[in-house]
Amino acid sequence: MKTHNLFSLLILIFVFNSCSKNKLTESDVIANYARLVSKSYLDSYTTALSMQSAINDFLENPTEDGLKKAKEAWLVAREIYGQTEVYRETNSPIDVKMSGIAPWGIANEAQMNAWPIDEAYIDYVKAGTEEFAGDYRSIIADSTKTITQSLLVDLNEKVTDKSISTGWHTIEFLLWGQDNSSPKDNLPGNRAFTDYTTHINAERRGQYLKIVTSLLVADLKSLADTWSKEGEYRIVFEKLDPKVALRQLVNGAFFMAGDELSSERMIAPVDSTDGLEGSGQEDEHSCFSDNTHRDVYANALGVNNVVFGNYDKISGVSFYDLVKQENETEAEKLKKAADDVMKKVTIIANSKDHFDYLITRESSSDSDFGPIMQAVVSLQALSDQISISANSIGINLR
C-alpha cells in the first residue's frame, strides 16, 4: 500500500514538473516576435534594394520597358513593407524620436509612408486637377532649389500634412503619375517614360526619383539594422519587462486593425468625395498605382503575423498561444475573428474591380455593406477581440 502511494506521488511530481517545464512564457513570445520583426524588415530592405536597382537602370536608359520593370519592382517591395506596418504604435524606433531616454529612436514612419499626397507639391499635374491635387510651384519645377536628400527631408509635410516629398507614395507618383481615369475604368496612372527624356524638367525629375528612392532604402536599412540580432533596439526590446514588451507588440496589432487600416485607410476613402467624379480617389492609399487592394491585404496579413507569430519561414509561439494557455474560449474567438478578417480582405484583394471603383459604390452609412465596409466591420471586431484577449493575460490596451 505504501509502495503504491509512493509510486502515485512520483507520477504526480513528474507530471507537475513536465507541465511546468512546458508552460509557455511571455519571454518566449517576445523572442519570436523579435525574430519576425527582424526578418520582415530585412526582407523589406532587400526588396527595396531590388526596386532601387530597377529604378536606377531605368534612369540610366529611360524606356517604356524600363519604366514597367521599375513599377513591378515597386509593387513587389510594397507587398513586404505593408506587412511591417503592424510594428507601428509599439513604442519602437519607427515612431519614437531619438532622445536621451531613447537613443535608438528613428521616427521615420512619416518620411517613408506619409499620405495622401498633394502631388502638385512634387511635380506637374493635369490642368484642372489642382483643386484636389494641390496648387503649388512644384519642387521639380522650382529650378532655384537644388534637389538633394536634405532638401526633400526638410520639405516633407512642411506646408500641410499633405505636402509630402518623400517615401513610398512619392516614388509611386514619380513612376505612375496621376490617375486621371474614371474609377470604373480600372486603370492606374499612366506616366510616359518620356517624362524622363524629353519632357520639361526631365533631368530634375530623374534626380528626384533617384534621391527619394535612395532615402527610402536608407530608412529601411536603419530599421533592419536596429532590429537585427545584435541591433541596438533588439537588445533594448528583449531586456524590457516582459509585460511591457508584450503590451507593445500587441498594441501594434490592436492599432492597425481597429484604427489605421479600418478607419484611416478604408472608411476615410469610402466616405471621401475628393478626386475625379467625387470618387474619393485622392484619399485612397496607393492611388497612383491602384495598388490599395494589396495594401489592405498586406496590412491585415501583418496583423495576422503578430497575433499568430508567423512570417515567411518563421513560425513560433505567439500572443494567441499565450491567450489559449490562459483562456481557450477567448483564444477560439480570437482565431475566429482573425480568420474572418483574412477572408474579407482576400475578397478585396482578388476583386476584379480596383479599390478606387469599389469605394464609389459604398458608404459607411449603408444599411447593406459592400466588401470594403464588411472588411472594416471584421477588422474592428478583431481589434476588440485583441483587446479582450489581452485582458485575459493581464494586459490592458485601452
Image: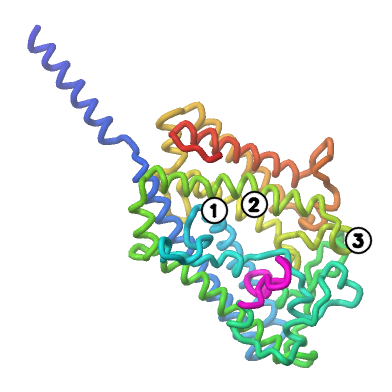
In the depicted view, which residue is nearer to us: 173 or 46? 173
Give the CA distance from mark 2 to mark 3.
Answer: 26 Å
Real-space CA distance between mark 1 and mark 3, rounded to the nearest whole angstrom: 35 Å
Q: Amino acid at mark 3?
A: Glu
Residue bearing the label numbered 3:
277
The local secondary structure at tag 1 comes to: loop
User: Which of disc 2 and disc 1 is earlier in sequence?
Assistant: 1
Q: Kindly check if marks 2 and 3 are in contact, taking CB atoms under 8 A apart as contact.
A: no
Answer with the quarter of the image where residue 387 lies. top right
Kindly identify which numbered label has been placed on residue 118.
none
Residue 72 versus residue 358 in the image, above or below: below
What residue is shown at x 53% (from left), y 70% (from top)? 47
Which amino acid type corresponds to the residue marked 1 in the rendered image? Glu
Magenta region, residue range: 154-172
- Which residue has dot 1 on it? 89
Where in the figure is residue 316, as x and y percent of width and height?
40, 47
Residue identified by numbered label 2: 260
